[in-house]
Structures are given as C-alpha cells and as structure tokens.
Image: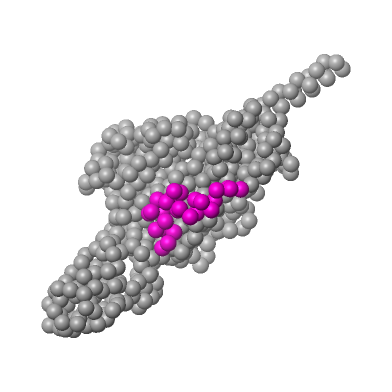
Amino acid sequence: MKKLISLIAFLYCFHAAAQEDAWVFLKDKPNAATFLASPLTMLSQRALDRRTRQNIALDNKDVPMETTYYSQIKSATGITVLAKSKWLNAIHVQGTPINIKNLKTTYNTFVEKIEFADKTLNAKGRVHQSSTTPKRKNKFEKTSTTFNYGNATNQITMLKGDFLHQQGYTGTGMYIAVIDGGFLNVNTLAAFKRLRDNNQILGGYNFADRNTNFYTRDNHGTNVLSTIAGYIDGQFIGTSPDAKFYLFISEISETETVLEETLWVEAAEKADSLGVDVINTSLGYTTFDNANYNYTYADMDGKTTFISRGAEIGVSRGMILVNAAGNDGRIDNPWKYIGAPADVAGVFTVGAVNATGTIADFSSYGPTSDGRVKPDVLAQGQNVYVINHTTGDPVTSNGTSFSSPIMAGVVACFWQAFPNLTNTQIMQRIRESADRYNSPTAQYGYGIPNFENTYNTVLSVDGQEFLNATTVYPNPVTNRLTIKTSLQNLENTKIQIYNVIGKKVFQKNSLTTKTIDVSALSSGIYILKITNGNQQNTIKLIKK
C-alpha cells in the first residue's frame, strides 16, 4: 500500500512538473488610442492603402501588445515566453501547469484568461477522442519525386492562368508572402535568378530561429515558391512571375508543436504590416508530438485552433490567405479531413487534382465540422512541376502543398487586374467560376476555377460599374484635370486625349496621381479615353 501511495505521489509530482504549452490572453491595450492616432507606427503605408481601398477601418487588433504586460509575463517565475500575437493579444508560454495558472492570480489586473494546449488542463477541459483524431504524420508528406524535364504548362492552363498572363497580368505590383518551413538555395539556384535580379524578394524572417536567415532549414518552401515565381526559359514558369515576395519561416520541420501555430500568426501579422496582398500557406495542423495537444474533427470549425483564429483576423485585414487543404484524403485513412487553418471560412482553401482534373486521392476532405464547403477550389497538385532544391531542375511532385501556391499565384494576377475589388469579392468571383459551383462535393469543393471566364464576367459587370462611375472634373477645364474614380491603385490606368480629327495629343501610361496637367492643350473639344486593363471609358472634354 505504501509503494502504491508513493507511486501515485511520484506521478502527481511528475505531471505537475511537466512543461506545458499555453496561451495567456491579455485584457486590453492601454495605449491603443495613441497608436490608432498614428497608424504608421503600426503599419506601412502600403498596408494602410490596402485597408483604404477595401474600406477597412483600423481597430485594437492592429495595435501592438502592451510592452509592460509582456515584460511582466516574461519575468514571471518558471515561465518561458516563446512567441506572441498582437491580433489575439496573447502570449505563448511554457511552464508547469501550476506556474502557468499562477499567472492569472498574480497578474489578474491584465490577464484575461489562460488556454492550455492540453485542453484537459483548462477549466472546461475535454477528453481527446482518439477515434476522430488523426495519427501523427510527416507534415510535408508527399509521394515520390521523379525527374522529368518537361514544363509547367498544364498547371497554369488548367486554371486559364495563361490567359491572364496574355492580358499582361503577371503579378506586377502585387506582394505575396510565403509562410513555410524553409527556402534552401533560393538565393543561389538559377531558377530564381530572375527573381533575384529584379529585386523581387523584398525580405523575410526566420521565426523558427529568430534570425534573418530565411534561406535555410527545409526545402519545402523552395518547392512551393518555385510554383509561383520560378523561371527557366523554355522549361518552367511560375504562375505569378512578376510579383514581389516576402519569405517567412514559421515551421520547425523536425518537430510538430503548437508553437508553430503561434509563429505562423506572428508571420501573418508581419505580412499584414508590410502591405502584403496574398499569403500562401502550404501547412496544416491536426496532430503534434505531444498527443495530448491533438485536435479532433470537431475542432475543425474555423474558430477553435489558435492558428485559425489568427487566420480569421488576417482575412479581416483585407488580405487573401490561400491555404493547402491537406494530404489526408486517402480512402484507408481514418482521418481524411482538412486541417487548420484551412477550416476558416474566409481562408481560400485549395485541394488537388491530377493533370486531367480528376481529384488526387490524397486531397483532404471537407466539409468543416460545422458544415461549410471546403475546400473552396482545386488546382493541379498531383505530378505537378516544382524546382528541385539541389539541382535546380524541374521535377514532378505531389501534394496540396503545391496546388495551393499555384492557385495563389493566379489569384494575385487576377487581383492585379481588378485592384478595386475587395479580398472577399475576388474569392467569391473565383468560386463562382469553378466547374462545380452549383453542386459542390466534400472533396472537390466548388471545383476547378476558370480565370478567363471570371475575368470576362468581372469586365462585363464589376468593370463596367467602375467605368460608369469614372469621370473627370472640372469640365470644361483650364489647366488641371482631376479623375474621379473609386480606383485607388492607378498604376495600370492609362489616359489618352484625342483632338476632333482623331490625332492623339496627350498620353500618360501610368498615373501616379488622380490630377493631370493639360495646360499645354489648345482651347477646343477633345475626346478623353481612360483605360484600365481591357476596361475603357470615353468622355468628351472641353478645354478653355
């Protein structure tokens, strides 16, 4: 009996001493008014411009975390601070359950609540249901890679991405962030030379190691980036070759921990602050090295996991978050569902098909646990071309890890064509163009989009509405003419003025301001043509 009591006491002490992960949620941001009054202390001008275009107001989620709160938690006894999120106003800590729970008592004035990754330690904990929890798996699982020196034509033409390229929309002016596990050799491979020579890599950060070396760790991000931005003349081209990129490492490839969720949220926050338009994430979370942290299908509701809550806020900031559905769809897999943050309503979740448009057997299933359609759309992810991180040659590989960035690149090109549309409008137009939009299924979602069709639809509907709402003043004009339009990004807008006999007397190919100087024109009647892509509006102009 004495031995049994001793064993129980030992086990209790062991459990009490075990290091656990938890998030400490803070109550407020006492200096919020000061930051909101000076937006450039929180966000870049480009980020603010993106908000303005989409009529998104700044709020407390944009405000940095209170530094005094953070410092006190960091200096608490037995607590290790690993990461933080301003969006969720939460600090990721490790410590014993006792020390972590003491934070709520000690700092009750500013600690709102504590959430343990092991939900059985929470006040309203639950027991994990192994029957609905996936087995631990390789996070970058994919089938064998074989060398094949073809080109990437099919993965672009399937989506009609080549049509957008032909219209001149190749990602110019768009910022894409890739959040992944590493970008080995992107700084040296010839397939990324065009990207480097044109200064299209704007920067990045290694959140896993807390340093600026993002050309390290895993090659998964290298393969992912190649499908968007790789270029080998005559052999390979990515879906958005002229976009600019930020490269972020949030994944610790040798482990699977909930810390990676928080690091991802940090990376997404950084992307937002830099004015990124599109984020690609070829990652997903369901299981961890510590099985007590595993999620169940019930958790795939877009609101439960830390990363999904962060992603939901990211969408609300006006970015498009493109995410891989996952590779668990095989029929013999008891867990065949999408992971987090692919379960978020506003995240653009991408499944995989083969070259003929048939679903890849590994592509994960929806719906979400609360019954929403997922994935949103599909792109080629089986026998897809990527750049090998060692040789720099095109090879074939498999996974929604690649259907996602292929889609992200085309999405960026499409948004370049219609910068006046919001992120939610862009995603909905793409869904509506997919081949199963009227009859979505659990694994196909809404199906394969057709970007040529949706481009033409937007031109005829949204584009015409824009042009009808575009005018100039004053008219008659003396010296300076102002263009009145809802369009904020004027880089793709061209102005041409013709006299009454059809001779072009003025042209400006890219507007940097809505005001133009026409003082050099003689008095008379002119025809002014405003062009944005294939959209045109013609206005009679009288010069005094």
Taking the magenta stretch, the answer to whether it contains residue 161 is: no
| Residue at (67% x, 38% y) in the render | 107
The furthest residue to the right: 1
From the top left corner, tell me how far across and down residue 87 is, in percent. Answer: 54, 48
Whether 158 is drawn above or below 202: the answer is: below
Closer to the camera, 116 or 252?
A: 116
Closer to the camera, 146 or 238?
A: 238
Assign the C terminus to one quadrant of the image: bottom left
Q: How many labels does the image show?
A: 0
Range shown magenta: 28-53
| Residue at (29% x, 55% y) in the render | 172
Taking the magenta stretch, the answer to whether it contains residue 38 is: yes
From the top left corner, tell me how far across and down residue 115 is, in percent. Answer: 66, 41
From the top left corner, tell me how far across and down residue 146 is, in percent. Answer: 35, 37
| Residue at (51% x, 46% y) in the render | 64
What is the quadrant of residue 212 in the picture? top left
What is the quadrant of residue 307 in the picture? top right
Specify the color scheme: one colour
351 left or right of 477 in image: right
| Residue 454 seen in render | yes
